[in-house]
Image: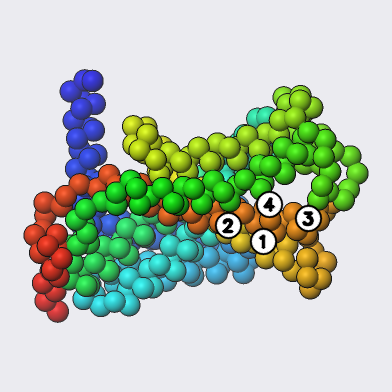
Amino acid sequence: MTWKTRNTSTSWKRLTACWPSWAEAAALRWSVLYAAGAVAAALTGPAYGYALLGKATGTVAEWTTAGLYGAAALLAYALPRRPDRAWPSRLAWPVVALCLTSGFAFLFSPAHLLAVFLGRNQPPMDWAAWANQAFAVTGAALWARAALAHRRRARGRCGYCGGHEAPAPVARRTRAGLVAVAALVPYATLKTAWALGATVGYTGTGKPGMDPRYTSDLGIRLYEHGVDVTAVLALAGMVLALALTRPWGLALPRLPLLALGWAGAGALAPFGIFLGVLGVLSWTGLTELGITDHAPWVVVVAYGGFCAYGLALGRATLAFQRSGRRACTRCTGARAGQAMPRPAR
């Protein structure tokens, strides 16, 4: 490693270590940039993925997006100026949800890229919208940090450790991983059974679980030999959950595990909720909407498991992130379980 690379790595570690000191300012700058881009997209177009509900230039959705992020910028301006109030950090969490709504498609981008390169008749990647969504997810991370730092400061606790000294032991983190694995078992089992020739839960014609128009040649060959690509991806998701919750996962690269864990949790939890609710409504006869050629119980049992997996994966990722936390050297009162002095009003 050269001196320049080593110096850059050290500077980056110092910057990330002192995140409570700059999180609120970063959230403000991000909000101003994103709101300005939303206004420019609404005025001139093209939208570049700014609209929450549509892509047409000048639509109500685009102006609503601009207004919401403009309000977020005002809230970011108020965060450091109301350090002893609880309401700014409470309002900050809806902004995190708003950012994730704008960048939700980015969380599925690995699967989309895989489908584009391995499948057929897939829509091309809109790289401008993809970059916009990635920037929105970055904003969600910045806003989450800003909300956490402000909440801890308002409660008189250390902004770095929050008053929690010891990381969660590995033994307490195994349950979330096992729940995540169990949640994907029905989906992986059903898709494998379909690939082996079974038709349980399938009411259509042709081969269940595979559309040759959108499946690659490799996927078709694997399916003919009883291997479903999505079942393989489910197994990879199980391995990820176990890596986050078992001792052997601590030896793996930390940053990729955290990135995959949070992306998977943020994408699959709401996706599973949507499919589960849709399946329940279709199963009970309250709606005729549903997945074509699938029995309602398939949506509830198999696809609805994505919700349980996403929630359990988020819990496992959070525990894994906390497990790498070192003892805080910036405070003594918070590490002893005592509240830090409240800032002067």
Horizontal side, residue 205 vs residue 125: left or right: right
Task: Work out which residue is located at the far front of the displayed protein and give it.
Answer: 171
Question: Tag on residue 305?
Answer: none
Q: Nearer the viewer, residue 285 or 109?
A: 285
Sequence-wise first label, 3 or 4: 3
The answer to whether the residues at label 1 and label 2 have Cβ atoms under 8 Å apart is: yes
Going from N to C along the chain, the mark reached first, 3 or 1, is 1
The quadrant holding residue 193 is top right
> Horizontally, is 305 left or right of 219 in the view?
left
Residue at 20% x, 47% y is 326
Please state which amino acid type lies under the numbered disc 3: Ile
The 10 Å Cα crowd at callout 1, few under 14, some 14 to 19, many 20 or more, is many
Q: Are marks 4 and 2 in contact (CB under 8 Å)?
A: no
Residue 291 numbered tag: 3
Q: Which mark is residue 302?
A: 4
Which residue lies under the disc numbered 2? 307
The three-letter code of the residue at mark 1 reads Gly
Of circles 3 and 1, the one toward us is 1
Distance (Cα) linking label 3 and label 2: 17 Å
Instruction: Name the residue beneath numbered marker 1.
Output: 276
